[in-house]
Amino acid sequence: MAGARDILRRARPLAPHLAVAGVIAFFLLHALHGRGGLLAYVHLQDRLAAAKQTRAELVEQRERLAHRIELLKPGTLNPDMLEEQARRVLNFARPDEVVVLLDHGDPAGGGEQP
């Protein structure tokens, strides 16, 4: 019994320091792993970079499509674009052209046909 009382007597002055250390550890843990912590911030920055990359790709695609649409407008009709679209829709080819048929089921666009 004397050993346990001796330990309690010596630990009592350390109690406030241990309590403060526990509170500091609590806040540091939440500063790193909490909802608004450092790791959440890094993850959010990664997501933001990916979203910016996707946006840039979509803007580029939109500009290409807008340019193609502009070429098909009645006032600025480009004969080459008109011919390309008509041949694609009507599935026509000139006699001197080579037609390469692609299998649309194959993502690589190639492969042997039976």
Image (spheres, grey):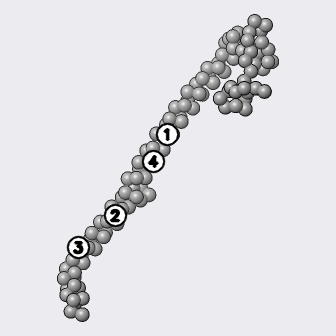
Q: Which sits earlier in the primary sequence, circle 2 or circle 3?
A: 3
Q: CA distance from mark 1 to mark 3?
A: 45 Å
Q: Please, what is the three-letter code of the amino acid marked with disc 2?
A: Phe
Q: CA distance from mark 2 to mark 4?
A: 21 Å
Question: Which residue corresponds to the image point at 59% horizontal and 27% vertical from the top-left?
Answer: 61
Question: Which residue corresponds to the image point at 79% horizontal and 14% vertical from the top-left?
Answer: 92
- Residue at which label 1 appears: 50
Is residue 90 shown above or below 35? above
Q: Quadrant of residue 57?
A: top right
Marks 1,2: beta carbons within 8 A = no
Question: Which residue corresponds to the image point at 64% horizontal and 20% vertical from the top-left?
Answer: 68
- Residue at which label 3 appears: 17
Q: Quadrant of residue 65?
A: top right
Nearer to the camera, 78 or 6 = 6
Give left or right: position of 21 versus 96: left
- Residue at which label 2 appears: 27
- Residue at which label 4 appears: 44
